[in-house]
Each structure stands twice: as structure tokens, then as C-alpha cells.
Image (tube, grey):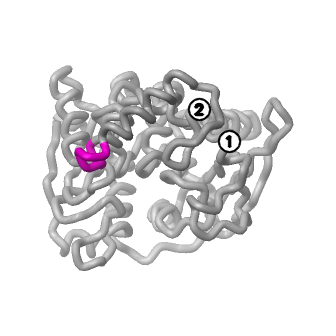
Amino acid sequence: MRLQPTFPLALFLACLQALPSSAARDVHTLSRADGSLIHYTLDRPPAHAGGLILISQGSGCAPGANNASLATVRAAFPNYAALIVEKIGIAPDSAIVDGYADCPQEFVTQYTLSQRVDDYRSVLNHLRSQSNMPAADLVLFGGSEGGLAVAMLAAQLQPRAIIMLSSSSGTTFAETVRRTVPPEGHATIDAGFAAARANPDSDELFAGSTYRFWADILDVKAVDYMLASSSPILLIQGGLDTSSPLASARLAADAFAAEGRCTLTYWEFPSLDHGMKMPDGRSRMAEIAALAAQWVEAPSPAC
């Protein structure tokens, strides 16, 4: 297990290079079994692609195609084709501003993590059928809740590499949420979760999401899926993250160590938050994405 507690700023800046822009950003649709549409964006490099990177956004309903953090990650992989799959009910041009309070009804009632993973698998299978793309050419990148999604995909697809950022990987989603809530709110959280488990198909809302959503995600523990994959994994965690607690990431690293597994590389940045920002508000996302891209090209064993 390799624990890298920090990187000096000079190394950050050295790894951040001027990256060429992509030449072809195409929006596509694919039909689900029920006839509804999956919207996805495929961004190809000017020259022959060296692989495909699926970039998976966190929670909320804002279009991924317009997500600044996802664009920063994409820029770090200029020689890859980049795939962003929108969540159910969302198109790249959806008029969404807040990303939580103004979500379309289809998203509110139908979105679950499992449904999202099914959409990813459908799009990837479709692209493979067109190009015969092997798993060795696929990189999965997920931030926050998107990290849970790519962890679930990883065991099925065995890609070239997996990158998870701020994803609370060592505890269940229920435990993660509970840790971020003050003790006086635990009774409300516990009651809501119990109601969701008792009514897993209900459209009734709790904390802005349906019981269906909560029942589907509450017991997901990313590390279980990570351990089921043989692909190299890079886990990136900020020490000041209050949404995906530091302790959860360390538990995931400990789980790999306990099994003597050398496929997990763990980077911990003590002064960065959930979005890879410093206390003064400066973002380090671009530098970290550049370092992650270098790691993908040579993911040496972590122990």
C-alpha cells in the first residue's frame, strides 16, 4: 500500500502543462428498454484516441457536459476520447441552474445509482459494438457519488485503470451520510433511512430524494466492488473533506492492506476539501488531474 500524504506545489505546477483542445464533441442518444433516452457526450481528440475515459459526476441533476470540474479532468487526458453520460431525465442542454432544487420530475422519480450504472453499461456496450474497444483501452474516473458508480462498474468491466476522487469508499453510503450530520439530526436520518428500506419502490421524498433512491444506495460500500476488481485503482482524498470523510478513505486503504492487495494507490492531500480546493479557495483540481493522468500511464504496484 502506498500512502502519499501530500505533493509539493512545485511538483503540482510542473505536472500542469498546456493541453490541446479536442476537435470533436458530439452529443448522442441511446434508447433504454422503456423507450426513454440516454443522453451522452463523446469528445474525441484531434488525432487517433489512445483510449476512452468515462468521467462520472457527483450528486445532483446538473448536466455533466457543462460541469467545470469534469472539463478540468477531461483536459488532463487530451489523447483520450472522453465520455460523459447524463443522468436520467437530463440532456446536455437542460436548463438547470441549481442542480438540486430545479431537477426535472423524471430525474426526481426515476434516478438511482443502480439505474445510472445500467446506463453507463448500456452506452459502453454500444460504443464497443461500434468500435470493438477492449477493456484495456478504458479508464474510469468518478468524483464523489460518481466514484461509487465507477466502482460498481469496475468489477464488471476490468478496465485499464480506475480513478476515484472524494468518494467515501470505505463505509456504506448510509454511514457516510450519518457521519456528516450533527448528532442531533441522527434520529431524523435514521427514521428516514428506515422508511426507505421499508418502502424501496416508493416515490415519497426524504431529504430531496425518493425512498427508491435511498433504498438502492444506502448499503453500497465502494470498497467491496473495488476489491472485486483486478484493475489498478487510484483513490484521491482531501483531508478537509466534510462530505466524504477522510476516515472512510483510510478504511478503504486499510482493507486493501489487510488482504495484501497491491492494486490500490492512495493519495491523501491534508489541506484540500471535497472539491480539491485549499482553505483560501484556490482549486488544485487541474494539478491533481494531471498527476492522475500520469499515474494512468504507469500505475506501478502500490506495495
Q: Quadrant of residue 99?
A: bottom right
- Residue 181 covered by magenta stretch: yes
The local secondary structure at tag 1 comes to helix
Residue placed at 39% from the left, 22% from the top? 228
Kind of residue at badge 2: Arg
Q: Are marks 1 and 2 in contact (CB under 8 Å)?
A: yes
Query: Where residue 285 appears, x then y in whole percent?
Result: 36, 66
The local secondary structure at tag 2 comes to helix
- Tell whether 269 sits left or right of 36: left
Q: Is residue 71 visible?
A: yes
Query: Where residue 249 appears, x then y in whole percent?
Result: 25, 42
- Marks 1 and 2, how far apart in space? 8 Å
The stretch in magenta equals 179-185
Identify residue for label 1.
109
Q: Nearer the viewer, residue 33 or 78?
A: 33
Kind of residue at badge 1: Thr
Whether residue 137 is situated above or below residue 287 in the rendered picture? above
Residue 212 - label: 2
- Tell whether 57 sits left or right of 293: right
Please rate how many residues cluster around mark 1, counting C-alpha atoms within 10 Å: few if below 14, some from 14 to 19, many from 20. some
